[in-house]
Amino acid sequence: MKYAVVIISISHRNIDHIFHYRIPEGLNVEVGMRVTVPFGKGNRPTEGYVVGFTDKADIDASLIKDISSICEEYPVISPKRIELAGWMKEKYYTTFGSCFRCIVPKKVNEKSFACVRLNNDNEGLNEEIIKVLKKDTRQKRVLEVLLNGDEIPVSHIKTLLDVDDSPINALIKKGVLVKVYVQEYRGNFNSALVERTKPPVLTEEQAAAVYRIFSDIDSNDKKPLLIHGVTGSGKTEIYIRAIEKVLSQGKEAIVLVPEISLTQQTVERFVSRFGSKVAVTHSRLSDGERYDQWTRARRKEISVMIGPRSAVFTPFENIGIIIIDEEHESTYKSDIQSPKYDAREIAVKLMELYGCSLVLGSATPSLTSYYKAQKGEYELIELKRRVNNTFPNIHIVDMRKEIAKKNFSVFSTELKNAIAENLENKRQTILFLNRRGHSTFVSCRRCGYVMTCDNCNVSYTYHKGINKLSCHYCGKSINVPALCPQCGSQYIKYFGAGTEKIEQEVLRLFPEARVLRMDMDTTRKKNSHRMILEDFRRGKADILIGTQMIAKGLDFPNVTLVGVMAADLSLNIGDYRSGENTYQLVSQVSGRAGRADKEGTVYIQTYSPDNYSIRYAALGDYKGFYNEEIIFRKNMDYPPFTNIFLVMMTGENEYILRQTISRLAEIMKRYNKNNMFTRLGPTPAVISKINNVYRWQITVKCENEDKIRNYVLFCLDKLSEQINTDKINVGLYLNPSYIF
Ligand code: ADP
Ligand code: ZN
Ligand code: ZN
């Protein structure tokens, strides 16, 4: 006798193991099928996945229940992907249920529309047709449209011939036509609107890179390839050639891009070459749209998927290549939702499972990836030149000297003059500041009181447009108090500039300039993001001011000047990656200048002009930066030399929270054999309260990823044996990419 091994798709640790079910007579059950089974004492109908079969049941055969039904006629998950789920469950300390939910899209009702065609099963079809064609009726007109055997939507026929349903229904009744339902795919990218383009002749560097990728595609011994190519070196064209090759072998390709570069522009570059073989996903797709795009992939109707990190799970079973563009981006890691997976790690696993090639590309690779390339774990491919062979002139501006010259404005004299000149020459300028709002904190000049949100321990940001103070964490906004709430003085002062302030300053200094601002406040409406960029591209504005939204992947031919308003912002976050982030940001922003035939100039304003991240970024010297940064990481024992595991505990009751986390610290101390693990904390989190929820943390460091994970999970189990932790929420983050 055969039993199905079923995993229940409920994400709860207690039921996260396998269950055995009997297969009722006549039900065709295959591995990977989604099934409904009776579960628990009440036999509640519950969804599960068949992951295998067995002859021996783990419980008494009389207690084994029957599978109720199958959800689809086909397997929704392949054996290799079941293996992937098992691997993810261990690696990301989560449940099978949550891994399956990543890999298999939520089932959504399919949308279909009615079509009609000739009823070829009717043996008397020809005679019927002749009869209908004899008389000049509406039925005849309908039939004539369908005589060539096409399947045409009913709605089209009705508009085309200006008829109602009756002639069509009459023909169906006579057996001349049949009605069929055709699935409509939601969320299709309209590739017909994109002009097809011809491939350019590759540069020497591009050709060499393509050659190395081709040999990896043909090799049986795959290794991730890291393309380190400066901005504008033509990486996208390299990706396209690699995809062409795998498609010619009848295989499929996945291209991951950060959400922010999923602009029309990037997508069109792929569509212009691969046409309707391309599908696009992004995080704003509805469940139905996502489901339909995945269905197309499963049915092999498309062979290239472009999307953000979740697209790594596209159900291609014959996958030839995975490309991860801007591989250093933190958005490839899911830090909030469980499983907290890293798309780059998933891609490496898929490379092992499917034997596909994996290409990671960036102008500023993550330190971890570059380190792997140095160790030989990845193969490094370098592109040192821009396609158009220019590099912008980058000037570092020491803002301390500006202050010494009594210039307290947000603009240095040099940048101000450069903007004026650029305006005169009718060229475009981008001004970058990684902070939105007008003033980033508001405080009393007399007593120093800082206006702070009561729900969160965060200072309010002043937004001039709405004339309110607003909290960027909980969204609360209040009127600006006329008097200091602490001392009653009226000397309330605004400090720290955000994008809104820059806009105001630009308009004051250059009243004739046409200005666009792009940040979270100006892009809340659907499509506003795209429209701002479109307007800027069309030359409807001279200056674009924005946050990191404008830093990446955009290619504006007429932009010749870029100003980085405050390069230090990302340096002062107090995180071990701040040097890396600053290098990346400054290089990416600078890469926006002089992309076409025009020379570009970049001004980097900073209070720390000697900082090595900023200096190397200005030189475009990634290697130099890497060599210095890697020594710092080594000396400080930071990743990639160790792993940092963050345990974040949150709760509404601060007293209980502190007691619980102290107890965890005691347990961690007791079980830290040979001091294998370095522990820091408990300490309040950088933001110690959000929305009235308190936040405390412990960090644990150890080189071995498995050991650190097992140790932390073990200590948490001990903790919940000792005390009730119901009121406390625990978040676990391995090498988190954000500061919590
Ligand atoms: P990257 O992704 O490395 O920043 P892109 O792929 O965006 O670089 O290429 C930069 C510009 O150069 C684009 O406008 C692209 O169309 C163009 N380009 C790329 N390869 C070639 C080539 N071989 N010949 C001419 N133009 C090219
Ligand atoms: Zn005061
Ligand atoms: Zn708040």
Image: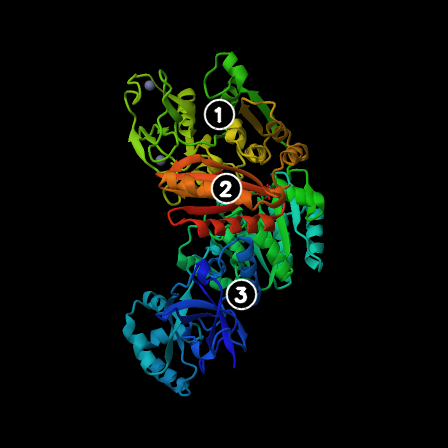
Look at the numbered disc 1 and give the secondary structure of its residue: helix
Question: Measuring 34% from the left and 66% from the top, which residue is drawn there?
Answer: 155
Q: Nearer the viewer, residue 603 or 59?
A: 59
The mark nearer the N terminus, 1 or 3, is: 3
Q: Which mark is residue 423?
A: 1
Few, some or many C-alpha atoms within 10 Å of disc 3 (few <14, some 14-19, many ≥20)? some
Quarter holding residue 389:
top right
Residue 100, label in figure = none
N-term mark: 3 or 2: 3
**Residue 374 location in percent, x, y?**
70, 43
Find the distance from the CA under tag 3 to the CA under tag 2.
52 Å
Q: Rounded to the nearest whole Å, what is the CA distance between mark 1 and mark 3?
A: 51 Å
Judging depth in this view, the residue of 317 and 234 nearest the camera is 317
Q: With respect to residue 207, does 131 lie above or below? A: below
**Residue at (30%, 67%) from the top-left corner?**
162
Q: Say which amino acid is labelled 2.
A: Ala
Q: Residues within 10 Å of mark 2 (few under 14, many from 20)?
A: some
Dividing the image into four quarters, tell me where ligand 2 lies.
top left
Q: Residue 665: give its label.
A: 2
Q: Tell me the mark number nearer the camera, choosing from 1 and 3.
A: 3
Where's residue 529, x and y in %? 42, 41
